[in-house]
Amino acid sequence: MPMLTSIRSRSGSPPAMPSSKLDSRTPLPNQSPEIDNIQFPRSWEAAWEAAGQANFERAQAFLFFYRGDDASTNSELRSIAANPRHRDVVSLAASVQRIVFGNRHSTFNTTSLLQWMRFVLIKSQALTSTKTNAVRDFFFDPSVARNLPQLPQDPVVYQYPAAPLKVMIIGGGPTGLASAIALAEKAGARVEVHLYEGRWIQQPGSSFVSYPPGARRRDQVVTLQDTVTDLMSDRTRQAVFGGNPERVWPGSSNLQIRKLEDGLLRRAQDSQFRDLIFLHASQVRQDNLPEYGDFHLMLGADGAGSWLRGAYFPGQEEEDQQSRRAGSAVRLYSPAPTPRSGALAGDAAMTVHFWPGRGANSGMKAGIAWADEVARALFHGQFVGLQTSSLGMYHDFLQKLQEREHGGRSLPIVKQTGDPDMMAWLMRNARLIPHHVAMEWLVGQMRRDGVRIQRRADWAFEQVNNLEPQLREILEKMDVVTIQEMAATFPWPTREMAGAEVLPERSVVDACLSGRRPTEISKVEKQTKSKKQDKKKKRAEISVSASEISPAFLASLVTHNKPAQRSSWRSFSFSRTPQAVQS
Protein backbone atom coordinates (compact mmCIF):
# COMPACT_ATOMS: atom_id res chain seq x y z
CA MET A 1 0.00 0.00 0.00
CA PRO A 2 1.34 3.44 -0.81
CA MET A 3 2.42 5.56 2.10
CA LEU A 4 1.50 9.13 1.31
CA THR A 5 2.69 11.36 4.11
CA SER A 6 4.70 14.55 3.85
CA ILE A 7 8.40 14.95 3.24
CA ARG A 8 10.57 15.53 6.27
CA SER A 9 13.80 17.39 5.69
CA ARG A 10 16.74 17.34 8.06
CA SER A 11 15.74 20.70 9.44
CA GLY A 12 12.24 19.61 10.42
CA SER A 13 8.79 20.05 8.95
CA PRO A 14 8.57 21.68 5.53
CA PRO A 15 7.42 25.29 5.44
CA ALA A 16 3.84 26.11 4.63
CA MET A 17 2.37 27.45 1.45
CA PRO A 18 1.57 31.17 1.52
CA SER A 19 -1.35 31.80 3.85
CA SER A 20 -4.68 32.40 2.12
CA LYS A 21 -8.28 31.37 2.38
CA LEU A 22 -8.81 27.90 1.04
CA ASP A 23 -11.45 28.86 -1.50
CA SER A 24 -9.85 32.07 -2.76
CA ARG A 25 -7.02 30.71 -4.90
CA THR A 26 -7.27 31.65 -8.57
CA PRO A 27 -6.85 28.95 -11.22
CA LEU A 28 -3.40 28.62 -12.75
CA PRO A 29 -2.91 29.11 -16.51
CA ASN A 30 -3.80 26.26 -18.86
CA GLN A 31 -5.51 24.18 -16.20
CA SER A 32 -8.96 22.67 -16.32
CA PRO A 33 -11.33 24.48 -13.92
CA GLU A 34 -12.80 21.18 -12.69
CA ILE A 35 -9.46 19.78 -11.56
CA ASP A 36 -9.43 21.66 -8.26
CA ASN A 37 -13.11 21.30 -7.47
CA ILE A 38 -14.26 19.06 -4.63
CA GLN A 39 -17.92 18.09 -4.24
CA PHE A 40 -19.92 17.26 -1.12
CA PRO A 41 -23.58 16.37 -0.61
CA ARG A 42 -25.65 19.45 0.11
CA SER A 43 -27.05 17.70 3.18
CA TRP A 44 -23.61 17.93 4.80
CA GLU A 45 -23.79 21.69 4.50
CA ALA A 46 -27.07 21.81 6.40
CA ALA A 47 -25.78 19.39 9.03
CA TRP A 48 -22.71 21.58 9.60
CA GLU A 49 -24.81 24.66 10.24
CA ALA A 50 -27.00 22.76 12.69
CA ALA A 51 -24.15 21.08 14.58
CA GLY A 52 -23.21 24.01 16.83
CA GLN A 53 -22.08 27.61 17.12
CA ALA A 54 -18.29 27.25 16.84
CA ASN A 55 -16.33 25.35 14.21
CA PHE A 56 -14.63 23.20 16.86
CA GLU A 57 -18.00 22.10 18.25
CA ARG A 58 -19.22 21.30 14.75
CA ALA A 59 -16.10 19.26 14.01
CA GLN A 60 -16.57 17.29 17.23
CA ALA A 61 -20.18 16.58 16.30
CA PHE A 62 -19.20 15.40 12.81
CA LEU A 63 -16.69 12.94 14.26
CA PHE A 64 -19.13 11.73 16.90
CA PHE A 65 -21.99 11.09 14.48
CA TYR A 66 -19.97 9.61 11.61
CA ARG A 67 -21.32 6.17 10.71
CA GLY A 68 -19.15 4.00 8.52
CA ASP A 69 -19.16 0.29 7.78
CA ASP A 70 -16.40 -0.40 10.31
CA ALA A 71 -17.70 -0.30 13.89
CA SER A 72 -14.20 -0.02 15.37
CA THR A 73 -13.50 3.06 13.26
CA ASN A 74 -16.73 4.66 14.42
CA SER A 75 -15.76 3.98 18.04
CA GLU A 76 -12.28 5.50 17.55
CA LEU A 77 -13.80 8.65 16.05
CA ARG A 78 -16.15 9.07 19.02
CA SER A 79 -13.22 8.66 21.43
CA ILE A 80 -11.24 11.30 19.58
CA ALA A 81 -14.20 13.70 19.58
CA ALA A 82 -14.71 13.24 23.34
CA ASN A 83 -11.05 13.62 24.28
CA PRO A 84 -10.70 16.82 26.36
CA ARG A 85 -7.09 17.32 25.23
CA HIS A 86 -8.24 18.52 21.83
CA ARG A 87 -8.66 22.27 21.67
CA ASP A 88 -9.06 22.92 17.93
CA VAL A 89 -10.07 21.32 14.64
CA VAL A 90 -6.49 20.67 13.53
CA SER A 91 -5.69 18.60 16.64
CA LEU A 92 -8.83 16.53 16.00
CA ALA A 93 -7.78 15.93 12.39
CA ALA A 94 -4.22 15.07 13.42
CA SER A 95 -5.53 12.41 15.81
CA VAL A 96 -7.75 10.94 13.09
CA GLN A 97 -4.75 10.88 10.77
CA ARG A 98 -2.58 9.08 13.31
CA ILE A 99 -5.05 6.76 15.07
CA VAL A 100 -7.57 5.89 12.37
CA PHE A 101 -5.54 6.16 9.16
CA GLY A 102 -2.19 5.20 10.68
CA ASN A 103 -0.54 8.08 8.78
CA ARG A 104 -1.08 6.36 5.46
CA HIS A 105 -3.65 5.99 2.72
CA SER A 106 -4.54 2.47 1.70
CA THR A 107 -5.48 3.57 -1.81
CA PHE A 108 -5.18 6.49 -4.20
CA ASN A 109 -8.99 6.62 -4.30
CA THR A 110 -10.98 8.78 -1.94
CA THR A 111 -12.82 7.03 0.91
CA SER A 112 -15.97 8.17 2.67
CA LEU A 113 -14.10 9.01 5.88
CA LEU A 114 -11.40 10.92 4.00
CA GLN A 115 -14.04 13.00 2.24
CA TRP A 116 -15.83 13.56 5.57
CA MET A 117 -12.62 14.92 7.13
CA ARG A 118 -11.92 17.11 4.11
CA PHE A 119 -15.34 18.70 4.49
CA VAL A 120 -14.67 19.41 8.17
CA LEU A 121 -11.30 21.03 7.42
CA ILE A 122 -12.59 23.12 4.52
CA LYS A 123 -15.66 24.37 6.38
CA SER A 124 -13.66 25.26 9.49
CA GLN A 125 -10.95 27.03 7.42
CA ALA A 126 -8.39 25.51 9.76
CA LEU A 127 -5.42 25.17 7.39
CA THR A 128 -4.05 28.70 7.59
CA SER A 129 -0.72 28.40 9.44
CA THR A 130 2.57 26.55 9.25
CA LYS A 131 1.44 24.32 12.12
CA THR A 132 -1.18 22.71 9.91
CA ASN A 133 1.17 21.46 7.16
CA ALA A 134 1.18 17.83 8.22
CA VAL A 135 -2.62 17.71 8.29
CA ARG A 136 -2.90 19.53 4.96
CA ASP A 137 -0.33 17.28 3.30
CA PHE A 138 -2.16 14.15 4.38
CA PHE A 139 -5.82 14.96 3.79
CA PHE A 140 -5.26 16.98 0.60
CA ASP A 141 -2.46 14.94 -0.92
CA PRO A 142 -2.22 15.81 -4.66
CA SER A 143 -1.81 12.16 -5.60
CA VAL A 144 -5.13 11.11 -4.02
CA ALA A 145 -8.42 11.53 -5.90
CA ARG A 146 -10.39 14.69 -5.14
CA ASN A 147 -13.83 13.11 -5.12
CA LEU A 148 -15.62 9.86 -4.44
CA PRO A 149 -16.25 7.65 -7.48
CA GLN A 150 -19.98 8.29 -7.11
CA LEU A 151 -20.53 12.05 -7.15
CA PRO A 152 -23.43 13.48 -5.12
CA GLN A 153 -26.63 14.30 -7.05
CA ASP A 154 -27.08 17.76 -5.55
CA PRO A 155 -23.54 18.85 -4.65
CA VAL A 156 -21.97 21.87 -3.06
CA VAL A 157 -18.65 22.67 -4.71
CA TYR A 158 -15.54 24.07 -3.05
CA GLN A 159 -12.02 24.82 -4.22
CA TYR A 160 -9.76 21.87 -3.44
CA PRO A 161 -6.84 23.12 -1.29
CA ALA A 162 -4.30 20.69 -2.74
CA ALA A 163 -1.09 20.23 -0.82
CA PRO A 164 2.07 20.81 -2.86
CA LEU A 165 3.61 17.97 -4.80
CA LYS A 166 6.71 16.91 -2.86
CA VAL A 167 9.68 16.70 -5.24
CA MET A 168 13.16 15.44 -4.42
CA ILE A 169 16.07 16.30 -6.74
CA ILE A 170 19.31 14.44 -6.15
CA GLY A 171 22.25 16.41 -7.50
CA GLY A 172 22.83 20.17 -7.30
CA GLY A 173 24.83 20.73 -10.47
CA PRO A 174 23.56 22.82 -13.40
CA THR A 175 20.96 20.20 -14.37
CA GLY A 176 19.49 19.84 -10.88
CA LEU A 177 19.45 23.58 -10.23
CA ALA A 178 17.96 24.44 -13.62
CA SER A 179 15.29 21.77 -13.12
CA ALA A 180 14.31 23.07 -9.67
CA ILE A 181 14.18 26.67 -10.85
CA ALA A 182 12.13 25.87 -13.96
CA LEU A 183 9.65 23.77 -11.97
CA ALA A 184 9.19 26.43 -9.29
CA GLU A 185 8.68 29.09 -11.97
CA LYS A 186 6.11 27.03 -13.86
CA ALA A 187 4.18 25.35 -11.03
CA GLY A 188 4.47 27.93 -8.24
CA ALA A 189 2.94 27.00 -4.89
CA ARG A 190 1.76 23.65 -6.25
CA VAL A 191 5.23 22.18 -5.70
CA GLU A 192 7.74 21.95 -2.89
CA VAL A 193 11.17 21.14 -4.30
CA HIS A 194 13.93 19.72 -2.11
CA LEU A 195 17.37 19.74 -3.74
CA TYR A 196 20.27 17.74 -2.25
CA GLU A 197 23.95 18.22 -3.05
CA GLY A 198 26.86 16.83 -1.05
CA ARG A 199 29.34 19.46 -2.28
CA TRP A 200 27.45 22.38 -0.79
CA ILE A 201 28.33 23.91 2.55
CA GLN A 202 25.99 25.75 4.92
CA GLN A 203 27.11 29.30 5.49
CA PRO A 204 27.59 30.03 9.23
CA GLY A 205 24.66 31.84 10.76
CA SER A 206 22.67 31.67 7.55
CA SER A 207 20.26 29.39 5.75
CA PHE A 208 22.09 29.93 2.46
CA VAL A 209 24.31 27.29 0.90
CA SER A 210 27.29 27.69 -1.40
CA TYR A 211 30.06 25.72 -3.05
CA PRO A 212 33.35 25.38 -1.14
CA PRO A 213 36.37 27.19 -2.61
CA GLY A 214 38.14 23.95 -3.53
CA ALA A 215 35.26 22.20 -5.32
CA ARG A 216 36.53 20.10 -8.23
CA ARG A 217 36.04 20.82 -11.94
CA ARG A 218 34.69 24.29 -11.29
CA ASP A 219 37.29 26.06 -13.43
CA GLN A 220 36.36 24.17 -16.57
CA VAL A 221 34.60 26.10 -19.31
CA VAL A 222 31.32 25.02 -20.89
CA THR A 223 29.75 26.27 -24.08
CA LEU A 224 26.10 27.11 -23.47
CA GLN A 225 23.94 27.02 -26.59
CA ASP A 226 21.47 29.85 -27.19
CA THR A 227 18.79 27.26 -27.92
CA VAL A 228 19.11 26.21 -24.27
CA THR A 229 19.55 29.55 -22.52
CA ASP A 230 16.65 31.01 -24.54
CA LEU A 231 14.41 28.51 -22.72
CA MET A 232 15.29 30.11 -19.38
CA SER A 233 13.31 32.95 -17.89
CA ASP A 234 14.80 36.42 -18.16
CA ARG A 235 15.69 36.47 -14.46
CA THR A 236 17.40 33.09 -14.62
CA ARG A 237 19.37 34.05 -17.71
CA GLN A 238 20.39 37.30 -16.01
CA ALA A 239 21.57 35.33 -12.97
CA VAL A 240 23.73 33.10 -15.18
CA PHE A 241 25.31 35.71 -17.46
CA GLY A 242 24.90 38.93 -15.52
CA GLY A 243 23.68 40.57 -18.73
CA ASN A 244 27.04 40.05 -20.44
CA PRO A 245 27.40 36.63 -22.13
CA GLU A 246 30.86 35.85 -23.48
CA ARG A 247 30.48 35.18 -27.19
CA VAL A 248 33.04 32.97 -28.91
CA TRP A 249 31.03 31.12 -31.54
CA PRO A 250 27.73 32.12 -33.14
CA GLY A 251 24.72 30.82 -31.26
CA SER A 252 26.55 30.09 -28.01
CA SER A 253 28.39 31.61 -25.07
CA ASN A 254 31.33 30.38 -23.01
CA LEU A 255 31.15 30.27 -19.25
CA GLN A 256 33.11 28.76 -16.40
CA ILE A 257 31.24 26.01 -14.59
CA ARG A 258 31.92 28.02 -11.43
CA LYS A 259 29.95 31.00 -12.75
CA LEU A 260 27.18 28.82 -14.13
CA GLU A 261 26.67 26.93 -10.86
CA ASP A 262 27.01 30.01 -8.67
CA GLY A 263 24.54 31.95 -10.82
CA LEU A 264 21.95 29.18 -10.74
CA LEU A 265 22.50 28.66 -7.01
CA ARG A 266 21.89 32.35 -6.31
CA ARG A 267 18.77 32.23 -8.43
CA ALA A 268 17.44 29.16 -6.58
CA GLN A 269 17.81 31.07 -3.29
CA ASP A 270 15.96 34.12 -4.59
CA SER A 271 13.11 35.40 -2.43
CA GLN A 272 10.74 34.51 -5.28
CA PHE A 273 11.21 30.85 -4.37
CA ARG A 274 10.69 31.15 -0.63
CA ASP A 275 8.70 28.12 0.53
CA LEU A 276 9.11 26.58 -2.94
CA ILE A 277 12.77 25.52 -3.24
CA PHE A 278 14.72 24.09 -0.29
CA LEU A 279 18.44 23.43 -0.63
CA HIS A 280 20.11 20.79 1.53
CA ALA A 281 23.88 20.44 1.90
CA SER A 282 23.62 16.68 2.14
CA GLN A 283 24.72 13.66 0.12
CA VAL A 284 21.84 11.30 -0.66
CA ARG A 285 22.87 7.68 -1.05
CA GLN A 286 20.86 4.57 -1.65
CA ASP A 287 21.46 3.29 1.88
CA ASN A 288 20.35 6.53 3.58
CA LEU A 289 17.46 7.43 1.28
CA PRO A 290 14.76 6.48 3.85
CA GLU A 291 16.17 9.12 6.21
CA TYR A 292 14.89 11.87 3.93
CA GLY A 293 11.22 11.07 4.34
CA ASP A 294 8.43 10.63 1.83
CA PHE A 295 8.01 12.35 -1.50
CA HIS A 296 5.90 12.02 -4.62
CA LEU A 297 8.48 12.51 -7.34
CA MET A 298 12.24 12.12 -7.52
CA LEU A 299 14.58 13.46 -10.20
CA GLY A 300 18.02 11.94 -10.53
CA ALA A 301 20.48 14.62 -11.65
CA ASP A 302 23.51 13.11 -9.94
CA GLY A 303 25.74 12.72 -12.98
CA ALA A 304 27.03 9.95 -15.21
CA GLY A 305 27.83 7.71 -12.23
CA SER A 306 24.27 7.92 -10.93
CA TRP A 307 23.45 5.29 -8.30
CA LEU A 308 19.81 6.14 -8.88
CA ARG A 309 19.94 4.93 -12.46
CA GLY A 310 21.43 1.61 -11.48
CA ALA A 311 19.05 1.13 -8.55
CA TYR A 312 15.72 2.11 -10.06
CA PHE A 313 16.21 1.97 -13.83
CA PRO A 314 17.97 -1.38 -14.30
CA GLY A 315 18.66 -2.90 -17.68
CA GLN A 316 18.61 0.38 -19.58
CA GLU A 317 22.16 0.34 -20.90
CA GLU A 318 22.37 0.20 -24.68
CA GLU A 319 24.21 -2.59 -26.42
CA ASP A 320 27.23 -0.47 -27.32
CA GLN A 321 27.57 0.78 -23.70
CA GLN A 322 28.21 4.24 -25.13
CA SER A 323 24.98 5.78 -23.95
CA ARG A 324 21.98 5.34 -21.70
CA ARG A 325 18.35 5.12 -22.52
CA ALA A 326 16.06 7.77 -21.12
CA GLY A 327 14.72 7.14 -17.64
CA SER A 328 10.96 7.06 -17.73
CA ALA A 329 8.76 7.47 -14.69
CA VAL A 330 8.51 4.42 -12.47
CA ARG A 331 6.15 3.64 -9.63
CA LEU A 332 7.40 1.81 -6.55
CA TYR A 333 5.17 1.05 -3.60
CA SER A 334 5.61 1.22 0.15
CA PRO A 335 6.15 -0.17 2.72
CA ALA A 336 9.52 -0.60 1.01
CA PRO A 337 11.47 2.65 1.61
CA THR A 338 11.76 3.47 -2.09
CA PRO A 339 10.64 6.35 -4.30
CA ARG A 340 7.25 5.94 -5.91
CA SER A 341 7.79 8.01 -9.02
CA GLY A 342 11.10 8.96 -10.55
CA ALA A 343 12.80 10.34 -13.62
CA LEU A 344 16.33 10.96 -14.80
CA ALA A 345 17.86 14.04 -16.42
CA GLY A 346 21.25 15.13 -17.67
CA ASP A 347 24.18 12.75 -17.36
CA ALA A 348 22.10 10.54 -15.07
CA ALA A 349 19.96 9.69 -18.09
CA MET A 350 22.70 9.82 -20.72
CA THR A 351 26.43 10.36 -20.91
CA VAL A 352 27.50 12.89 -23.53
CA HIS A 353 31.05 14.16 -23.27
CA PHE A 354 32.44 14.31 -26.80
CA TRP A 355 30.97 17.68 -27.78
CA PRO A 356 31.98 20.81 -25.85
CA GLY A 357 29.34 21.67 -23.30
CA ARG A 358 26.82 19.09 -24.51
CA GLY A 359 26.52 17.52 -21.07
CA ALA A 360 25.45 20.82 -19.50
CA ASN A 361 23.28 21.79 -22.45
CA SER A 362 21.52 18.45 -22.72
CA GLY A 363 21.04 18.24 -18.97
CA MET A 364 19.50 21.68 -18.56
CA LYS A 365 17.36 21.15 -21.64
CA ALA A 366 16.10 17.85 -20.22
CA GLY A 367 15.48 19.48 -16.83
CA ILE A 368 13.37 22.24 -18.37
CA ALA A 369 11.40 19.66 -20.38
CA TRP A 370 10.83 17.68 -17.18
CA ALA A 371 9.57 20.80 -15.39
CA ASP A 372 7.20 21.48 -18.30
CA GLU A 373 5.62 18.05 -18.02
CA VAL A 374 5.40 18.03 -14.21
CA ALA A 375 3.66 21.42 -14.23
CA ARG A 376 1.31 20.34 -17.02
CA ALA A 377 0.43 17.12 -15.20
CA LEU A 378 -0.28 19.07 -12.01
CA PHE A 379 -2.52 21.56 -13.81
CA HIS A 380 -4.55 18.70 -15.27
CA GLY A 381 -4.72 16.47 -12.20
CA GLN A 382 -2.63 13.72 -13.78
CA PHE A 383 -0.59 13.01 -10.68
CA VAL A 384 -3.60 11.40 -9.03
CA GLY A 385 -2.52 7.79 -8.57
CA LEU A 386 1.09 8.64 -9.55
CA GLN A 387 0.52 7.12 -12.96
CA THR A 388 3.63 6.59 -15.09
CA SER A 389 1.78 8.10 -18.05
CA SER A 390 1.86 11.52 -16.36
CA LEU A 391 5.46 11.96 -17.56
CA GLY A 392 5.06 10.08 -20.82
CA MET A 393 5.87 13.10 -22.99
CA TYR A 394 9.06 13.72 -21.02
CA HIS A 395 10.13 10.16 -21.69
CA ASP A 396 9.48 10.66 -25.42
CA PHE A 397 11.46 13.91 -25.41
CA LEU A 398 14.42 12.32 -23.67
CA GLN A 399 14.47 9.47 -26.17
CA LYS A 400 14.65 11.99 -29.03
CA LEU A 401 17.31 14.00 -27.24
CA GLN A 402 19.40 10.92 -26.64
CA GLU A 403 19.14 9.87 -30.26
CA ARG A 404 20.26 13.34 -31.34
CA GLU A 405 23.15 13.63 -28.90
CA HIS A 406 24.52 10.13 -29.28
CA GLY A 407 23.62 9.32 -32.85
CA GLY A 408 24.18 12.77 -34.29
CA ARG A 409 27.05 14.07 -32.16
CA SER A 410 28.93 11.53 -30.07
CA LEU A 411 28.85 8.69 -32.58
CA PRO A 412 30.79 10.55 -35.32
CA ILE A 413 33.64 11.17 -32.89
CA VAL A 414 33.59 7.59 -31.62
CA LYS A 415 33.75 6.22 -35.16
CA GLN A 416 36.32 8.73 -36.33
CA THR A 417 38.85 8.87 -33.51
CA GLY A 418 37.35 6.73 -30.76
CA ASP A 419 39.74 3.84 -31.34
CA PRO A 420 42.79 4.40 -29.09
CA ASP A 421 45.00 2.31 -31.38
CA MET A 422 43.96 4.31 -34.40
CA MET A 423 44.65 7.61 -32.65
CA ALA A 424 48.06 6.37 -31.50
CA TRP A 425 48.90 5.33 -35.06
CA LEU A 426 47.87 8.75 -36.37
CA MET A 427 50.08 10.51 -33.86
CA ARG A 428 53.08 8.31 -34.62
CA ASN A 429 52.85 8.89 -38.36
CA ALA A 430 52.23 12.61 -38.01
CA ARG A 431 55.95 13.33 -37.78
CA LEU A 432 56.49 11.97 -41.28
CA ILE A 433 54.40 14.73 -42.84
CA PRO A 434 56.55 17.54 -44.29
CA HIS A 435 56.17 20.65 -42.18
CA HIS A 436 55.37 22.91 -45.12
CA VAL A 437 52.66 20.53 -46.36
CA ALA A 438 51.02 20.44 -42.94
CA MET A 439 51.25 24.22 -42.63
CA GLU A 440 49.66 24.91 -46.02
CA TRP A 441 46.77 22.57 -45.40
CA LEU A 442 46.04 24.00 -41.94
CA VAL A 443 46.14 27.59 -43.19
CA GLY A 444 43.80 26.79 -46.05
CA GLN A 445 41.37 24.85 -43.88
CA MET A 446 41.27 27.50 -41.15
CA ARG A 447 40.89 30.35 -43.63
CA ARG A 448 37.90 28.68 -45.29
CA ASP A 449 36.26 28.02 -41.93
CA GLY A 450 36.93 31.57 -40.76
CA VAL A 451 35.41 33.15 -43.86
CA ARG A 452 32.35 30.91 -43.62
CA ILE A 453 31.73 31.63 -39.96
CA GLN A 454 32.21 35.39 -40.33
CA ARG A 455 29.45 35.47 -42.93
CA ARG A 456 26.88 34.35 -40.38
CA ALA A 457 24.37 36.97 -39.30
CA ASP A 458 24.96 36.11 -35.64
CA TRP A 459 28.76 36.52 -35.73
CA ALA A 460 29.51 38.59 -32.63
CA PHE A 461 32.84 40.17 -33.65
CA GLU A 462 34.21 42.56 -36.25
CA GLN A 463 35.04 41.18 -39.67
CA VAL A 464 38.69 40.25 -40.23
CA ASN A 465 39.70 40.57 -43.88
CA ASN A 466 43.35 39.51 -43.66
CA LEU A 467 42.88 36.13 -42.04
CA GLU A 468 45.62 34.23 -43.83
CA PRO A 469 48.59 36.37 -42.69
CA GLN A 470 47.37 36.28 -39.11
CA LEU A 471 46.87 32.52 -39.23
CA ARG A 472 50.38 32.02 -40.58
CA GLU A 473 51.84 34.26 -37.91
CA ILE A 474 50.17 32.25 -35.15
CA LEU A 475 50.91 28.81 -36.62
CA GLU A 476 54.57 29.62 -37.28
CA LYS A 477 55.04 30.21 -33.55
CA MET A 478 53.86 26.69 -32.78
CA ASP A 479 56.05 23.63 -32.39
CA VAL A 480 56.68 21.68 -35.62
CA VAL A 481 55.40 18.42 -34.13
CA THR A 482 52.19 20.14 -33.00
CA ILE A 483 51.59 21.39 -36.55
CA GLN A 484 52.18 17.91 -37.93
CA GLU A 485 49.80 16.31 -35.42
CA MET A 486 47.12 18.90 -36.14
CA ALA A 487 47.33 18.09 -39.85
CA ALA A 488 47.42 14.32 -39.36
CA THR A 489 44.41 14.07 -37.06
CA PHE A 490 40.92 14.77 -38.22
CA PRO A 491 39.43 18.23 -37.68
CA TRP A 492 36.49 18.46 -35.32
CA PRO A 493 33.43 17.63 -37.48
CA THR A 494 31.40 20.65 -36.44
CA ARG A 495 29.35 20.89 -39.60
CA GLU A 496 28.72 17.14 -39.77
CA MET A 497 27.43 17.20 -36.20
CA ALA A 498 25.18 20.20 -36.73
CA GLY A 499 21.46 19.95 -37.33
CA ALA A 500 18.10 20.74 -35.82
CA GLU A 501 18.14 20.79 -32.03
CA VAL A 502 15.69 18.73 -29.99
CA LEU A 503 13.88 21.25 -27.81
CA PRO A 504 11.06 20.94 -25.26
CA GLU A 505 8.05 22.04 -27.27
CA ARG A 506 6.12 23.62 -24.42
CA SER A 507 8.94 25.96 -23.38
CA VAL A 508 9.60 26.97 -26.99
CA VAL A 509 5.93 27.78 -27.56
CA ASP A 510 5.75 29.71 -24.29
CA ALA A 511 8.81 31.74 -25.27
CA CYS A 512 7.32 32.55 -28.67
CA LEU A 513 3.90 33.52 -27.31
CA SER A 514 5.36 35.68 -24.57
CA GLY A 515 7.45 37.62 -27.06
CA ARG A 516 10.50 37.10 -24.88
CA ARG A 517 12.47 35.68 -27.79
CA PRO A 518 10.87 36.55 -31.14
CA THR A 519 13.74 34.84 -32.97
CA GLU A 520 12.60 31.51 -31.55
CA ILE A 521 9.78 31.42 -34.11
CA SER A 522 12.22 31.40 -37.00
CA LYS A 523 14.31 28.79 -35.20
CA VAL A 524 11.32 26.49 -34.86
CA GLU A 525 10.43 26.99 -38.52
CA LYS A 526 13.99 26.23 -39.53
CA GLN A 527 14.03 23.09 -37.43
CA THR A 528 10.76 21.94 -38.96
CA LYS A 529 12.09 22.38 -42.49
CA SER A 530 15.30 20.48 -41.77
CA LYS A 531 13.60 17.64 -39.89
CA LYS A 532 13.54 15.22 -42.83
CA GLN A 533 17.15 15.89 -43.80
CA ASP A 534 18.31 15.55 -40.22
CA LYS A 535 16.45 12.26 -39.86
CA LYS A 536 18.12 10.86 -42.96
CA LYS A 537 21.52 11.95 -41.72
CA LYS A 538 21.04 10.23 -38.37
CA ARG A 539 19.94 7.03 -40.01
CA ALA A 540 22.86 6.92 -42.41
CA GLU A 541 26.08 5.29 -41.30
CA ILE A 542 28.48 8.01 -40.29
CA SER A 543 31.81 7.66 -42.05
CA VAL A 544 34.68 9.81 -43.30
CA SER A 545 35.54 9.61 -47.00
CA ALA A 546 39.03 10.02 -48.44
CA SER A 547 38.13 13.46 -49.78
CA GLU A 548 37.50 14.68 -46.25
CA ILE A 549 40.91 13.64 -44.98
CA SER A 550 43.72 16.15 -45.08
CA PRO A 551 46.02 15.97 -48.14
CA ALA A 552 48.97 16.06 -45.77
CA PHE A 553 47.80 12.91 -44.04
CA LEU A 554 47.03 11.10 -47.30
CA ALA A 555 50.49 11.96 -48.54
CA SER A 556 51.99 10.19 -45.57
CA LEU A 557 50.09 7.02 -46.44
CA VAL A 558 52.08 6.50 -49.63
CA THR A 559 54.92 4.93 -47.67
CA HIS A 560 53.22 3.81 -44.47
CA ASN A 561 50.66 1.10 -43.88
CA LYS A 562 47.58 1.41 -41.70
CA PRO A 563 47.22 -0.75 -38.55
CA ALA A 564 46.37 -4.36 -39.28
CA GLN A 565 42.83 -5.63 -38.73
CA ARG A 566 41.33 -2.24 -37.93
CA SER A 567 37.68 -2.41 -38.96
CA SER A 568 37.41 1.32 -38.26
CA TRP A 569 39.32 2.04 -41.48
CA ARG A 570 37.00 0.33 -43.93
CA SER A 571 35.04 3.44 -44.81
CA PHE A 572 38.13 5.62 -45.27
CA SER A 573 38.93 4.34 -48.80
CA PHE A 574 42.69 4.10 -48.40
CA SER A 575 43.01 2.13 -51.62
CA ARG A 576 43.85 5.26 -53.61
CA THR A 577 46.99 5.22 -55.70
CA PRO A 578 49.80 7.65 -54.89
CA GLN A 579 49.03 9.57 -58.07
CA ALA A 580 45.54 10.40 -56.75
CA VAL A 581 46.93 12.20 -53.73
CA GLN A 582 47.55 15.91 -54.11
CA SER A 583 49.58 17.80 -51.56
Image: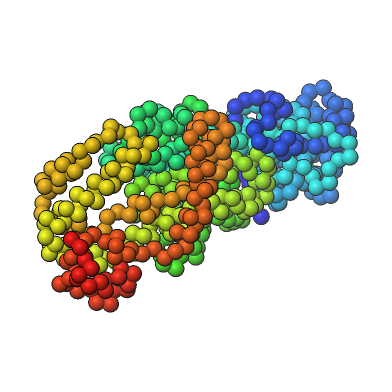
Colour convention of the picture: rainbow
**Residue 308 makes an appearance in the image:** no
Q: Nearer the viewer, residue 311 or 234?
A: 234
Identify which residue is drawn at 16% across, 56% down: 438
In the image, is 373 to the left or to the right of 154? left
In the image, is 504 to the left or to the right of 346? right
In the image, is 532 to the left or to the right of 464? right
User: In the image, residue 102 lies at what x, y percent?
Assistant: 67, 47
Question: Is 325 drawn above or below residue 271 in the view shown?
Answer: below
Q: Quadrant location of the C terminus?
A: bottom left
User: In the image, residue 345 lies at what x, y percent?
Assistant: 47, 49
Q: Nearer the viewer, residue 314 or 449?
A: 449
Res 462 quadrant in image: top left
Q: Quadrant location of the N terminus?
A: bottom right
**Residue 477 makes an appearance in the image:** yes
Question: Is 67 drawn above or below residue 326 in the view shown?
Answer: above
In the image, is 447 to the left or to the right of 79? left
Q: Nearer the viewer, residue 479 or 421?
A: 479
Question: Is 45 drawn above or below residue 250 in the view shown?
Answer: above
Identify which residue is drawn at 68% across, 31% down: 27
User: In the image, residue 163 lies at what x, y percent?
Assistant: 64, 37
Q: Nearer the viewer, residue 242 or 374?
A: 242
User: In the image, residue 231 lies at what x, y percent?
Assistant: 48, 38
Identify which residue is drawn at 49% across, 57% down: 535
Numbered circles on residues, count: 0
